[in-house]
Image: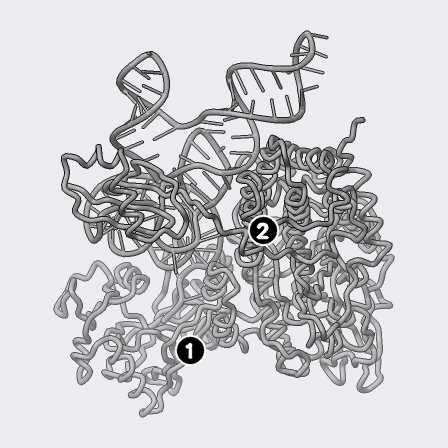
Amino acid sequence: MENKYDFENIENKWQKYWKENDFYKVKVDESKPKYYNLEMFPYPSGNLHMGHVRNYAIGDVVARFKSMCGYNVLHPMGWDAFGLPAENAAIQHSIPPAQWTDTNIAIMKEQLQKLGVSYDWDRELATCKPDYYKFTQWMFLKLYENNLAYKKDAGVNWCPSCHTVLANEQVVDGGCERCEAKVEKKQLEQWFFKITDYAERLIDDLDLLPGWPEKVITMQTNWIGRSEGCQFSMAIADSDETISVFTTRPDTVFGVTYMVLAPEHPLVKKMCAENTVKQEVKDFVEEIEFTSDVDRTSTEAEKLGVFTGLYAINPFNEKKIPIWIANYVLIDYGTGAIMAVPAHDERDLEFALKYNLPITTVIQGDTNSAADEDVQEAYIGDGIMVNSGEFDGLSIEAGQKAIIDFIEKNSIGEGTINYRLRDWLISRQRYWGTPIPIIHCENCGVVPVPYKDLPVLLPENIAFKPSGESPLKYVDDFINTTCPTCGKPAQRETDTMDTFVCSSWYFTRFTSPNNADLPFDREAADYWMPVDQYIGGVEHAILHLMYARFLTKFLYDIDMLSCQEPFSNLLTQGMVLKDGVKMSKSKGNVVSPEEIIDKYGADTARLFILFAAPPERDLGWSDQGVEGSYRFLNRVWRLVNDYAENIRDITAKPAEMDKLDEATKDLRYKTHFTIKKVTDDLEERFNFNTAVSAIMELSNTLYSYRNNPNPDLTVVKEAIESLLILLTPFCPHFCEELWEVIGNKESITLQAWPEYDQTALIKDEVEIVVQINGKVRDRVKVPSNSNKDELRQIALENSRIVELTKDKKIVKIIIIPDKLINIVAK
RNA sequence: GCCCGGGUGGCGGAAUAGGCAGACGCACGGGACUUAAAAUCCCGCGACCUUUACCGGUCGUGCCGGUUCGAUUCCGGCCUCGGGCACCA
């Protein structure tokens, strides 16, 4: 009778069984070690793509493996549900964003369930629901209370296509990260989170994360951009004003030949306002103001500047130096003013050469000289201080210390550290996001919404303007309110929060998703947090992961959480490619997960995606590769079914190794070797691809064993059961079914992860390699654990070796027991 | 420009402490089964040389060099692809 692998019925059957029996529900259980496994939650765009499948397949293997190893595993899933696409759909198709989002969530949830991922769906959350965003607002209020949320008028990145501002982090190559429109500069009053207060901890605590990829640590380190140096002020000649500058090279202060202000510098504004500068200066400042940050900060941008007519006094040598304004100095880093040392800074040199400014060498190294007159290349290497008065002769390092000492003693400045990180701009001029819980009152000014009034509900059923402008501005019911402080009429803030705010605390909410009073229970969070394993795309290496770290540290500081870092271990998975490029609608190379699941089943899809490449690397999709995985499952299906009748009632355990024949011994060895291999691969390295290979090898060994005329069914049963258990995290439905086929009553998911039998891994004979001068000349079988003398003897008596060394002199013999013998001969 | 990763058969990828390069899979070739095809099962599959055949030999992990009895693995210098940052003083 034909017995086909009917994946469709099998998958439905077991998904239903798991659901009806609450298989993946978890609760706090102090008697078990906990394991919090989390995959980055998706934006409900409408359909699962292969990247999602990869992410969740990896996560499910980890969750199921840990669970079988005896951990109490929290494995939740939710929806990062606020964001622009919902709003665009509303504008284009007149569907309310909430409805569009809910529909998509329903579709994607069904697709996820079809994959058979072991989520505790009772903990599902969506960031766009009031019971969730209530606490996103709570986070805002807490930050506000702690002076970490503030409003300021700032030059911001404006996306003309999305009609909203963007955080610096969301500007990619000068364009909007979402729509790629060229970002413009706009002056607006906006809300910021003061993430810069945490810059030092965000960079230092990266050391607490040995379980993160080096790459991500580096990216964050660079992004935060710590620079050590000092700040000091220079007096302006014939004036009471001073200008403060920041430098990382205090050792070069004697080489300062001019200084530069950013065009936005307050002093420049003042000069222009007071008309104390030439028209030429005003024109220049105005011109630069209209230049976008992108054009301005490009390294290719030409350096432009203008002389103000003013001079500063270098406090170290009392020299008068001209003050310039130039486009290459940025207002929002350091003090917005620099001391220029053209001899030792490429940018300053380029500027000095263009505008004919003097160049003084103050560091002498191997390739330059103190007397150099026609400097064409900035010297930035090591050396000693010259032309620097009393500091001459000091090394760069000693010089920096000495100058900072001098600055501090003379009270003109101090040693400081600057970070490249800027505060996080969280205002968005959009509708579909968490409303900022702030009220503007004519009497009281900015008033935070009291906690008891949360959530500030986002009004639904409203009209969208095709302009893309936030519709909230026109919802009178929403805007008009009363001031919580004085009770007079007041207006609500109409900006919403960046969706990254929603996703920077969701992992804590999963620990107690139904708490109505607080974002999460302290007790539950203390049990589950931090996330033991976080898995997602490397594209979140900076933004999401840094914001989440920031908020976790903040929650720690206000005594809400006991951990300072949210994610102990991080796995960044590679992309899914087709024909060498990322799958995308525009390239027309998308393979839909549904199609694959319909054709081969979820288990095949999962298996292929885990087998085809190691998780952190990009994976090339191959239709034929999927076929291969499907073939493998069918092979196992036939094998197990063929044996089912014969092994079902066997209860005896395999006999001692020395009582088995050679082929049976090999099978038993392979079984236990595979247990060890798969366990190591999953536990230590997340090498799912090699774990699958090992399981395939065990299946191949079982196939070879079928030729054995007197099979030992106790060993066969052990091999088959082990194979199925090892394969369960990868292909759970398939393994459940076969587990039942061979007569087991209790779900395979509930089986303990097997331990290998050390005695089965002892071989009495091993094949070792015999080399001459490092080249393999023969292989011989020897009893395992043969000692060096025995091996030497065997090698020297070997006929091939005798033949090949007869004209040579044996200089040395290297022996690695159970592995190889290398004869060095001349 | 700076900082990270990669580079191994026709392809995806193995080699976990310096010790048999190419596990496992895909593709391909041959055979068995079949009226035939599909499916399945078995065998082969880095290049070159030698040989009727077996056997055997040389080269081979981006390139050049080094350390070592022995290097995909360690060291130095390059080439190249991918990613991140980029006028941050």
Q: Within 10 Å of the Cα at label 1, are there few (<14), some (14-19), or many (20+) other Cα atoms?
A: some
What's the distance in space between the residues labelled 1 and 2, CA to CA?
68 Å
Above or below residue A373? Residue B59 is above
Q: Amino acid at mark 1?
A: Ile
Q: Residue A40: in sight, yes or no?
A: no
Is A645 on the left or on the right of A284, as rendered?
Answer: right
Residue A647, x across and y down, in percent: 73, 41
* Residue where numbered disc 1 is placed: A417
- For residue A646, the mark is none
Q: Residue furthest front?
A: A659
In which image quadrant can residue A490 be found? bottom right
Say what secondary structure mark 1 lies in.
strand
Is A703 on the left or on the right of A356, as rendered?
Answer: right
Q: Chain of mark 2?
A: A
Residue B50, x across and y down, in percent: 26, 17
- Residue at 79 percent across and 62 percent down: it is A25
In which image quadrant can residue A189 be found? bottom right
Residue A673, x across and y down, in percent: 54, 49
Above or below residue A651? Residue A355 is below
Say what secondary structure mark 2 lies in.
loop
Is A226 on the left or on the right of A160, as rendered?
Answer: left
* Residue where numbered disc 2 is placed: A656
Q: Chain of mark 1?
A: A
- Residue at 78 percent across and 71 percent down: it is A134
Above or below residue A691? Residue A445 is below
In front of the other: A230 or A268 = A230
Q: Residue furthest left?
A: A371
Q: Earlier in the sequence, mark 1 or mark 2?
A: 1
Whether labels 1 and 2 share one chain = yes
Q: Amino acid at mark 2?
A: Glu
